[in-house]
Amino acid sequence: MGREIKIAFHPPVVDYLEQLTFTLYKKDYFGFIDSAINYIDKMIDFISKNIHTRPHKKAPAFFDVYGKNMHYITYQSNKQTTWYIFFIENDNRFLIKHITNNHVSGHLFDD
């Protein structure tokens, strides 16, 4: 029997996702607040279902300000946007430390 997977979001990440919901709505990326909420919920669902199985890469040194020895996975929400989910993993416990996207930080990645 496998070990239980535990996933937690660092409080600043929770704050970021909540603020992102409203930002996406206010900037007219979504016409309804419920659509923006759904967009963020899909990302969280993806993280919960995939963080322990998806191939991950070592985070670029630039992101060490959010934590040491981090890795990341990517989530492609649409053709234009790729999200980078940074985390620390220890014994099947994952702490999500930072989330950004290619529009903000894409230039910091080699791939």
Image (cartoon, rainbow, N blue to C red):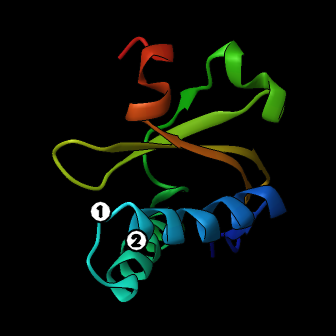
The amino acid pointed to by label 2 is Tyr
- Give percent across and percent down for residue 62: 69, 16
Q: Are marks 2 and 1 in contact (CB under 8 Å)?
A: yes
Amino acid of disc 1:
Tyr
Determine the residue positioned at 29% across, 44% down.
81
Whole-percent x, y for residue 93 in the image:
76, 60
**Residue positioned most to the bottom:** 34
Circle 2 SS class: helix
In the picture shown, does residue 56 fall above or below 97?
A: above
Q: Between residues 22 and 77, which one lies in front from this camera angle?
A: 22
Dot 1 surroundings within 10 Å: few (below 14), some, or many (20 or more)?
Answer: few
Please state, as top left, top right, bottom left or bottom right, where the C terminus lies in the image: top left
Q: Which mark is residue 50?
A: none
Question: Residue beneath label 1, please?
Answer: 29
Element at label 1: loop
Pointer 2: residues within 10 angstroms few (<14), some, or many (20+)?
Answer: some
Residue at horizontal 62 percent and vertical 17 percent from the top: 60
Q: Nearer the viewer, residue 81 or 44?
A: 81
Q: Position of residue 107 (x, y in %)?
A: 43, 15
Question: Where is 91 relative to 49, above or below?
Answer: above
Q: Residue 48: horizontal and vertical position, in percent?
A: 53, 70
Report the side of 59 relative to 69 (left or right): left
* Residue at image coords 40%, 84%: 33
Q: How many marks?
A: 2
- 29 sits to left or right of 104: left
Residue 64 picture quarter: top right
Q: Quadrant of the N terminus?
A: bottom right
| Residues at marks 2 and 1, CA–CA distance in whole angstroms | 6 Å
Of 38 and 31, which appears nearest the observer? 31
Left or right of 28: which side holds 92? right
**In percent of the image, x 71 and y 67: which residue is there?**
14
Say which residue label 2 marks: 25
